[in-house]
Structure formats: structure tokens, C-alpha cells
């Protein structure tokens, strides 16, 4: 059987039946934002770290589970920092899911608005046909039609393209939230 691209890049853990996203760190602080002055417990996840994890997760099809493996020097082992980091990781993706839900609700509202506006403009265009020689009223009439079709196009774009992208992004965040975070210590 031919191996997929992701199967060459990521190790498969037969025991947990998950693909591993592996990251080498010098310290627990490497995961957190350097510019965040909050105490260790409340610090925000570094954007580069999150982007790397998200990009790696995109490489692996959603049908597979993932495990995040963080490699650290043996002398840095600190169980309290481990649990804090796991908590921060989960909080970060819980917040991302909540932001995503708000974006989805906004998209739904815009989609309904576009459909209503499209129906309204197209109805006006069809019901009130102007047979005049006046160029301005003809331009307004055509503008109403064009506006109706543009809003109808936006409605379909939101339904068939943007909703699909948002659904995939939601599933990625959900998988990251549910993924195991494992620490491995090396010399």
C-alpha cells in the first residue's frame, strides 16, 4: 500500500493508535508568549507554537487522532509545569472553539440577511418593471437586479464554501482540544 505524505512525516503510535506531532523544547516557557507578562499559570500560548501545531494537524487527515509529544531536557522535569502547560493548551483551544462558534453565528446571520435582501431586490426588479425611455430609471432598475443577484451569490458562497471551511476548522480545533499531550524527557 502506498504511504501518504503525512505517514512519511509523522510517526504512528500503535499503542494509542494516534499520529504524533513532535516538538522539541528547551524549557516549558518556549510554548508561551514571551511578551505576555502574566504569571506562568495564566500565560498565553505562543502564536508560532500554535501555528506549528495547527499546520501539522492539517497535514494529518481528520479521520486520525493525534498526540502532541513535547521533548524536554531531563533536568527540566516539573510535573506542576506539565499540568499547567496542558491546562493552558486546552484553554487555548477551548477559547478558539468559542471564537469559532461566534464567527459561525455571525456568518449565519449574514447569510440570512443576504438571502432576504436578495429576495427583496429581485422581487422589486421583477414586480416593478419600468418601460420608460428614461435612462436613469433603467439604470436604477438594472442596478436593483444586479444587487439582487450579487446578494444571492453571496448567500450561496456562504452556504457552500465558507460554511464548509468553518466546519473543517472547527473539527481541527476540536481534535486538538481532545488530543493527548505527552511529555518525553531526553538527555
Image (cartoon, grey):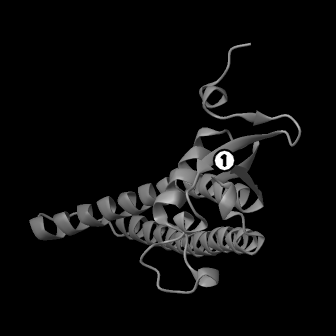
Q: Name which residue lies at 65% across and 35% down.
A: 10
Question: For mark 1, does the 10 Å Cα neighbourhood hold few (<14), some (14 to 19), or many (20 or more) residues?
Answer: few
When the figure is inspected, residue 87 is found, relative to residue 158, above or below; the finding is: below
Q: Name which residue lies at 67% across and 19% down.
A: 3
The residue positioned farthest toward the bottom in the image shown:
38
Q: Position of residue 124 (x, y in %)?
A: 38, 70
- Position of the N terminus, as image quadrant, is top right
Label 1's element? loop
**Is 54 on the left or on the right of 13, as rendered?**
left
Q: Name which residue lies at 66% across and 53% down.
A: 70
Q: Position of residue 90 (x, y in %)?
A: 70, 69
Quarter-wise, where is residue 133 in the image?
bottom left
Which is more toward the observer, 56 or 85? 85
Q: Position of residue 178 (x, y in %)?
A: 77, 60
From where the camera sits, is residue 63 visible?
no
- Disc 1 marks which residue? 187
Q: Position of residue 128 (x, y in %)?
A: 35, 70
The residue positioned farthest toward the top in the image shown:
1
Amino acid at each position: 500500500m502506498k504511504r501518504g505524505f503525512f505517514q512519511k512525516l509523522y510517526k504512528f503510535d500503535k499503542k494509542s493508535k494516534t499520529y504524533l506531532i513532535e516538538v522539541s523544547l528547551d524549557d516549558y516557557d518556549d510554548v508561551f508568549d514571551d511578551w505576555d507578562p502574566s504569571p506562568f499559570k495564566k500565560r498565553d500560548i505562543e502564536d508560532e507554537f500554535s501555528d506549528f501545531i495547527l499546520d501539522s494537524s492539517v497535514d494529518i487527515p481528520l479521520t486520525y487522532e493525534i498526540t502532541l509529544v513535547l521533548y524536554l531536557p531531563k533536568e527540566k522535569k516539573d510535573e506542576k509545569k506539565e499540568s499547567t502547560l496542558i491546562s493552558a493548551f486546552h484553554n487555548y483551544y477551548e477559547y478558539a472553539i468559542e471564537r469559532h462558534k461566534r464567527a459561525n453565528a455571525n456568518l449565519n446571520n449574514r447569510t440570512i440577511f443576504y438571502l432576504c435582501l436578495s429576495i427583496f431586490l429581485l422581487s422589486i426588479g421583477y414586480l416593478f418593471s419600468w418601460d420608460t425611455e428614461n435612462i436613469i430609471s433603467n439604470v436604477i432598475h438594472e442596478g436593483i437586479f444586479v444587487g439582487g443577484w450579487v446578494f444571492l451569490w453571496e448567500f450561496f458562497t456562504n452556504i457552500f464554501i465558507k460554511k464548509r471551511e468553518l466546519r473543517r476548522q472547527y473539527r481541527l480545533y476540536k481534535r486538538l482540544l481532545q488530543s493527548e499531550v505527552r511529555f518525553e524527557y531526553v538527555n
